[in-house]
Image (cartoon, helix red, strand yellow):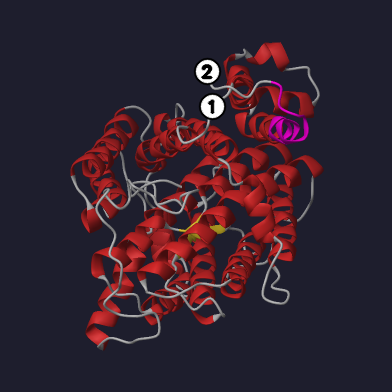
Amino acid sequence: MVSDANLEPSTHPLDEATLDKEPLPTVLNVGFDERVPWPTHIALSLQNMLVLAGLFLFPGLFGATFHLSAGDIAKLYGAAFVAVGFATVLQGVLKLRMPMVLGPWSGALAGLTVLGKLYGLGTAFGSCFVAACIMAVFAIPFRGVSLIRVVAKLFAEPTLTGGIVLITGIGLEQIAVVNWVGKPGAVGFGSGNWIGGGIALLLVSIFFAFTKGYVRSLAMIIGIVVGTFIFAVFAPVHFTAVQHGPWVSAPSAFQFGFGVNATALIIFIVLLLPPFISALGFYQMVAEWGGETVDSDRMAWGAFGLAIGSILAPIIGTFTVSVYPENVGLLRQTRNGSRWITVTAGVLFVVVGFIYKIGAVFAGIPSGVIGGAAAAMFAVILIAGVEILAKADWTPRNIIVVGLPVVLSIGGVFLAANVYANYPLIIRSLITQPLVTGPFLLIIFFLLDKLVPAQVGQKR
């Protein structure tokens, strides 16, 4: 949701950071259904793959947080490649027929991480799966339309979407910094983590701040690669999963088990809303670039493809998907809107997902480096929430609707462990996890604000 560095979907149709605030072209040189010579086709397909930096970061960060083995992390990468590729293909071949590339959704990473710690990974992934199924029901095209547009219209307000993004960024920063610092006794703790991860953070920040276009999109990969080499000066970097693992491996269904928790289910439903809201905006914008009109029927099928991809993701143990603005930005930069290019990128991702050794290479990246690079990435998400909130029409009621959930959700983080150690699990969760407290309070206050007649309508 935000910009080139974090490679997340925007909750509004036009992401100014991604597009560098330059005038948008009115017509693409290559239409959605047109084809280009194969050398150009393959080059652009690979370019679309490389800018999905979140895809190369999230599985490693998630695996390090739960102390998974290198072999299990390699499988996480494989599952992520398959889910992203499958969902991207659907955007190009279903009735939407547009060049939309999907990537892992940061809100799903945050939700699975926090709720996985609270209720177990099986329950986290199971609850995410049920939430995605509910979203798919809303997205089913019926006579050319779907209920998801009604839901998206109801919740597509800066106060809600910006608040969710802001709270998500806060929760993700906690995860990133913990992995960057590491734990005493772990490989790289001290100089390796601080310097290797710090170099990764510095490079990502510099490339994001002082470059643009395709170079900026590669900031995350460059930071991780250089940070890993620096880390290796202070501590060993192991790629044992590459050496001893098989060449081919298929994702497993619910490898962490399956369970459903009502609290987790509600949180995931809230977290899955922004990708659908942003996707509808991107469909409209890209259609205008291509000189086409995207009617309700095509948009409904696009949302349905997004939902199907989000259902597959938790089944095979990975993150739900969203449209990535960096890939939308590539359309503007190259002026090539052929959907066959993005379909090819999706197919290649699926193939790569079954090649275990490729995932194993990424699994060997030190968690301290992953955490340092992620800290820069998630900082952009957090500030993106502020940017979205700046678009709101602020009133005294809006300030309470957004401000109180944010303050209360952050406040519990600073409590000492002995304060809440004897509380029931649900109370500890509400107190100490911003991603649990924040969305709950925000959605409740938002709905109350809609239901209760306005008493104070003036701006501050």
Residue at the location (27% across, 54% down)? 218
Depth check, front residue: 358 or 275? 275
The relative height of residue 423 versus residue 366 in the rendered view (above or below) is above
Q: Residue at x 75, y 59 (%)?
A: 134
Q: Are marks 1 and 2 in contact (CB under 8 Å)?
A: yes
Q: Is residue 257 visible?
A: yes
* Structural distance between the alpha carbons of marks 1 and 2: 7 Å
Numbered mark located on residue 394 in the image: 1
User: What is the magenta segment's predominant secondary structure?
Assistant: helix
- Residue 83 part of the magenta-drawn span: no
Q: Which residues are magenta?
A: 444-455
Please provide percent x and percent y for residue 228. Answer: 28, 46
Where residue 311 appears, as percent x and y from the top left, is 66, 64
Q: Which residue is mark 2?
A: 460
Where residue 428 appears, x then y in whole percent?
73, 24
Judged left or right of residue 3, residue 323 is right
Residue toward you, 418 or 406: 406
How many other residues sit within 10 Å of disc 2, few (<14), some (14-19) or many (≥20)?
Answer: few
Q: Secondary structure at mark 2?
A: loop
Q: Is residue 445 magenta?
A: yes
For the view shown, which residue lies furthest in the left direction? 210
Residue in the image at 62% along x and 13% along y: 415
Q: Residues within 10 Å of mark 1 (few under 14, many from 20)?
A: some
